[in-house]
Image (cartoon, rainbow, N blue to C red):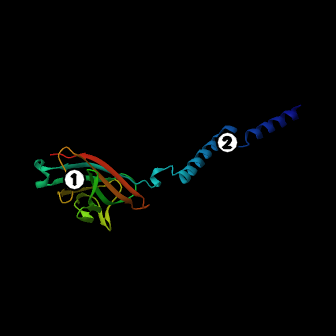
Amino acid sequence: MKKINKLENINTNKKGKRGLSNIVGSLLLIVLTIVAALLIGHFVFGLFSANSHNAGISISDASVIIPGGEYTAQGASITLTVTDSGNDPIVIKTIYLESGGAQYALLGGTTGTTTGTTTGATVLQPISGEYQTVKGGYLVEPGQSITFSGIVTSATVPSLSTGQTIVFLVSGVDNVTAQTLSQQISVVVQD
């Protein structure tokens, strides 16, 4: 009997030294599965936004002011700030003002009027911000802004009046993917 007991002890000692337990092996399998799922999600679905192309334009601080309320004599002062709200650089190409059912080009673009067509309007000029002048527009890096300002007269926009609601339409292009972007904002003309 003593010999059998020695064999049992030898067998049990070998059993305890075999390797990782079933619980540790299961945990490793779960961790590896989660890591594999994240990697597949990253490449297939663009799960991590830092590596995806996300372009965007936002408009803020837009104002139209007619000094003294007399548009035909004074014109209107326009200011608006455009921000690159995505993670790709954008090129601001055009800014239009919509009033009374018609669009008027304030930067770039084309305006059709009764006296002809105006192409490449330059009513608005950049006055501040971080940007680069490039062919066809202004390059703005992610998170940066550019502020435009100018004076609109009755020669550019036939009629504006205090209290009127107008719309600014800003268009640009994602400088990485060449995707066209646009954003608009409504503004009430102030005195």
In the rendered image, the residue lying farthest to the right is 1
Sequence-first tag of 2 and 1: 2
Is 79 rendered above or below residue 9? below
Q: Quadrant of the N terminus?
A: top right
Q: Amino acid at mark 2?
A: Gly
Q: Amino acid at mark 1?
A: Thr
Is 42 rendered above or below residue 18? below
Q: How much space separates mark 2 and mark 1, taking CA atoms?
A: 64 Å
Q: Position of residue 71 (x, y in %)?
A: 14, 52
The quadrant in which residue 147 appears is: bottom left
Residue at screen point 56% across, 51% down:
39
Disc nearest the viewer among 2 and 1: 1
Does residue 157 appear left or right of residue 70 in this picture?
right
Q: Nearer the viewer, residue 58 or 114?
A: 114
Q: Position of residue 112 (x, y in %)?
A: 28, 62
Q: Position of residue 77 (x, y in %)?
A: 17, 53
Q: Nearer the viewer, residue 44 or 28?
A: 44
Q: Secondary structure at mark 1?
A: strand
The quadrant in which residue 19 appears is: top right
Is 186 rendered above or below residue 119? above
Badge 2: how crowded within 10 Å, few (<14), some, or many (20+)?
few
Q: Residue under circle 1? A: 79
Is 5 rendered above or below residue 31? above
Q: Residue under circle 2? A: 25
Badge 1: how crowded within 10 Å, few (<14), some, or many (20+)?
many
